Amino acid sequence: MKCAVHHSEAVGVCVYCGRALCAVCSPSGATQRLTCSENCATALAQNEKALSMLLQKHLQSVRINAFFYLLCGVLSIAGAFCANYYLPSPFLIWFCAGCGLIFSVSGIWQWLAARERGR
């Protein structure tokens, strides 16, 4: 591969725009990632910041989902107990208990996934 500017042999590629860089063009900065210009370095930093923010928002969403599932599970199980005493309908009792179990398992699963991703 040839350098985009000097047409000599390339030693690397810009991680943002994909241009080939020779030894003269490649900056000797403190960053670990190779970029061809300050504009590419700035754009790359902005992209990484946006990606980090998206990952944090996703983690927050998973935690909220876990709380919602656990809350629905507890309410459904409480509904099954209440149905046992006030409306002794086997279908209603089993339906509420089954929903409560499924919601609780889903909530625990989401909570564990959020905890694993947060590390």
Image (cartoon, rainbow, N blue to C red):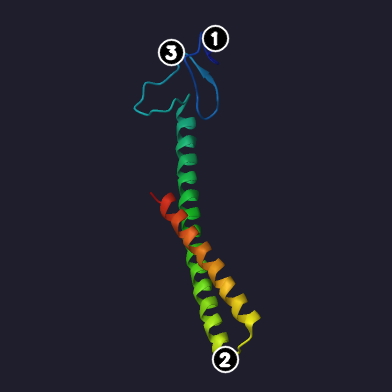
Give me the residue at 44% from left, 25% from top. Answer: 34
Residue 6 or 82: which is nearer the viewer? Answer: 82
Whichever of labels 2 and 3 marks the residue nearer the N terminus, that label is 3
Residue 88 or 31: which is nearer the viewer? Answer: 88
Q: Which residue is mark 2?
A: 86
Give me the residue at 51% from left, 9% from top. Answer: 9
Kind of residue at disc 2: Tyr
Kind of residue at disc 1: His
In x, y percent, where is residue 10? 50, 13
Residues marked 2 and 3 touching at CB (< 8 Å): no
Tag nearer the camera, 2 or 3: 2
Q: Which residue is mark 1?
A: 7
In the rendered structure, the answer to whether residue 29 lies left or right of residue 43 reads left
In x, y percent, where is residue 64? 49, 63
Q: Residue furthest bottom?
A: 86
Mark 1–mark 3 Cα distance, whole angstroms, equals 11 Å
Q: Which residue is mark 3?
A: 23
For numbered disc 1, what is the local secondary structure?
loop
Whichever of labels 2 and 1 marks the residue nearer the N terminus, that label is 1
Tag nearer the camera, 2 or 1: 2
Q: Is residue 37 above or below residue 76?
A: above
Residue 72 or 54: which is nearer the viewer? Answer: 72
Kind of residue at disc 3: Ala
Whichever of labels 1 and 3 marks the residue nearer the N terminus, that label is 1
In x, y percent, where is residue 113? 47, 54
